[in-house]
Amino acid sequence: MKTRRDFLQKLAAAGLALPVLSTMAKGSAMPILDTTPYDGPMLRVAIMGLGGYGSRVAEAMQDCKKARITGVISGTPSKIKDWQKKYNIPEKNCYNYSNFDAIKDNPDIDAVYVITPNALHREQVIRVAKAGKHAICEKPMALNAAEAQEMVDACKKANVKLLIGYRMHLEPKTLEIIRLRKEGKFGKILFFQGLSGFRIGDPTQWRLNKQLAGGGSMMDIGIYSVNGARYMVGEEPVWVTAQETKTDPVKFKDGVDETIQFQLGFPSGAVASCLSTYAMNNLDSFFLDGEKGFAELKPATGYGPIEGRTSFGELNFPHVTHQTVQMDEMAEMILNGKQPVVPMDGAEGLKDMKIIDAIYQAAKTGKKVPLSR
Ligand code: NDP
């Protein structure tokens, strides 16, 4: 896996590091590749759910300057042992799903990163908040807007932060397009297209279990187009329409969507046309069209490198490991109240859940569903 360390080493070897880094720092809100030494406070994080993505986050956090792993919460004792060794985690910072409320008495843990199946997020985040710790939660933050609202309320009541793992909100090419759009370079925005999908394998995995996933492709991958439509267009949608197709009802049972096409309408009159699917590969792109120009990201949301161009030229920013940047920036948000360019808090996650609820409703009823703002 490419890491920031690898990247910096390559740049240094090529004698390029400083020019590139200082160019990037200029005139952009990009929170990346800060090579200055850091001896300030660290965000001490316990990872909950030591699965595929939890492992990726942990690996990337090795390169963080402002965040580090100090604990784990897992239902699998053998994984706990492995992680203890790999990340030097003391026994007193290891928990399971029954006893993790005791983190409230653990001064080594500031925040818990919930990286478990979707259906578990609500209860786990609320318990983290009740333990007085900040919560970072993977997308989708919940199964629906009602659950998401409960999580936002619980964190507010406990006076802890709730952040959602929207790593694309910190991705350099994405941020550059947002900056250009805000500057009016593309003129009035007219259209967004988002394609988000992959062909899912193992039919027994939790992602295809309604109970644990809360739905199908829309919850897992379609959410990138929902979220992307909002940050690329720069408005909140006021209506949705949606159509569902299913070619394999055995693999994709009732309530588990295989493919949904959806459309969003924005107050300015801009529209979005998006596809979410578990049945096709090679679908990861965003296209934004305005009266004066366009922007394209392809791939748009994978782990990178993200590729992007606009009608004015290629976007040439170096690849960063998304999860390293995310955790360093989240440390700043939690410890110092830093505000990202595109919000990453519970309220932001709740907006996506409201839209996803409406997409499911529109697909089911065939009707245009208005969204309250
Ligand atoms: P995995 O199945 O790889 O891992 C989930 C882990 O959750 C398991 O390994 C297990 O860890 C724990 N777990 C607790 N209860 C259960 C249960 N009933 N069934 C299965 N696992 C359970 O999933 P991912 O890591 O891919 O996804 C986890 C979350 O992260 C999801 O919400 C997903 O949407 C999100 N995600 C986000 C990505 C992003 O780019 N932002 C990318 C991939 C996923 P343990 O054994 O330690 O208890």
Image (cartoon, rainbow, N blue to C red):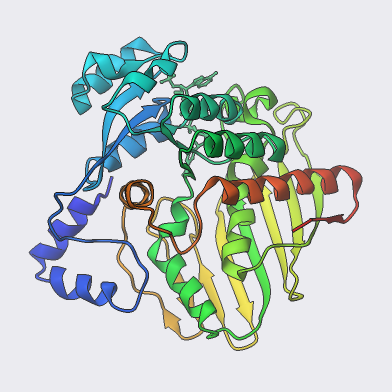
Is 76 left or right of 87, judged from the image as shown? right
Q: Position of residue 163 (x, y in %)?
A: 47, 44
Identify whether 245 is placed above or below 18: above
99 or 353, nearer to the observer: 99
Is 70 left or right of 199, judged from the image as shown? left
Residue found 63% across the figure and 77% down from its top: 289
Q: Where the C terminus falls, by quadrant?
A: bottom right
225 or 249, nearer to the observer: 225
Q: Is residue 197 visible?
A: no
Is 186 left or right of 30, judged from the image as shown? right
230 or 98, nearer to the observer: 98
Residue found 57% across the figure and 64% down from its top: 231
- Image quarter for residue 132? top left
Residue found 29% across the figure and 61% down from its top: 32
Q: Where the N terminus falls, by quadrant?
A: top left
Q: Position of residue 309 (x, y in %)?
A: 46, 75
Q: Is residue 38 visible?
A: yes
- Image quarter for residue 255? top right
